[in-house]
Amino acid sequence: MSVTNGVGTDVTELADMSVVGNVVVQNGAGGALGNAGHTWIRNPTGPGRAVIGGNVSVTYKDGDVTTVPDELLDVQVMGNVTFAHGRGNSDTVLAGDQTALPAIVRATSRSPAPGRRSSATTAHPASSVSSSAPTSGSRAVPGTTR
């Protein structure tokens, strides 16, 4: 599944669906006020987790993803998860929300090119996420996984 957005505040929300292959979201430059928008992949009506059979890749050319963070909620990703937030600030949440189950990433979760401030939060202590080390310009949040 592939979504390509142009210039402006882009909102991509995938709910209550499982995907056999990869999910790729490519966002253009942020809006006039600097807001890039957000990407949600979630399973709000359950039961259990939605499954992404491949990788998840979300990119932003620039703009901030902080007013509403990127979210992977109640999802199991069989491959890698990559959020590339360009030059903007960003927040990303990986968690269980409607279920008691954590979000799971079977391979790695990373933000290879964080902006001025980049953070990833896992809201469930049993969330299974591995990731690359923080890079220059990023901020690790206590109790979170990067």
Image (cartoon, rainbow, N blue to C red):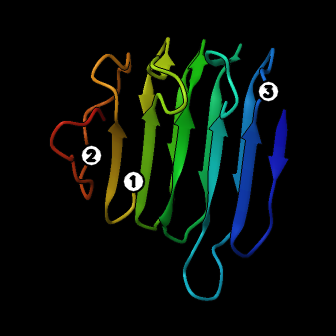
Mark 3 nearby-residue class (10 Å; few <14, some 14–19, many ≥20): some
Percent position of residue 107, x then y: 48, 14
Is label 1 in contact with label 2 (beta carbons under 8 Å)?
yes
Mark 2 nearby-residue class (10 Å; few <14, some 14–19, many ≥20): some
Provide the residue designation for mark 1: 114
Provide the residue designation for mark 2: 135
In percent of the image, x 68 and y 23: which residue is there? Answer: 46
Tell me which numbered mark, 1 or 3, is placed earlier along the sequence.
3
Tell me which numbered mark, 2 or 3, is placed earlier along the sequence.
3
Tell me which numbered mark, 1 or 2, is placed earlier along the sequence.
1
Percent position of residue 35, x then y: 57, 75
Camera-near label (2 vs 3) is 3
Instruction: Name the secondary structure under disc 2.
Output: loop
Provide the residue designation for mark 3: 17
Instruction: Name the secondary structure under disc 3.
Output: loop
Instruction: Name the secondary structure under disc 1.
Output: loop
- The answer to whether residue 62 is above or below residue 48 is below
Asked whether, in this view, residue 42 is left or right of residue 72, the answer is right
The CA span between labels 1 and 3 is: 28 Å
Asked whether, in this view, residue 54 is left or right of residue 107, the answer is right
- The answer to whether residue 79 is above or below residue 119 is above
Mark 1 nearby-residue class (10 Å; few <14, some 14–19, many ≥20): many
Percent position of residue 10, x then y: 72, 65
- Residue placed most toward the observer, 73 or 105: 73
Percent position of residue 135, x then y: 27, 46
Q: Quadrant of the C terminus?
A: top left
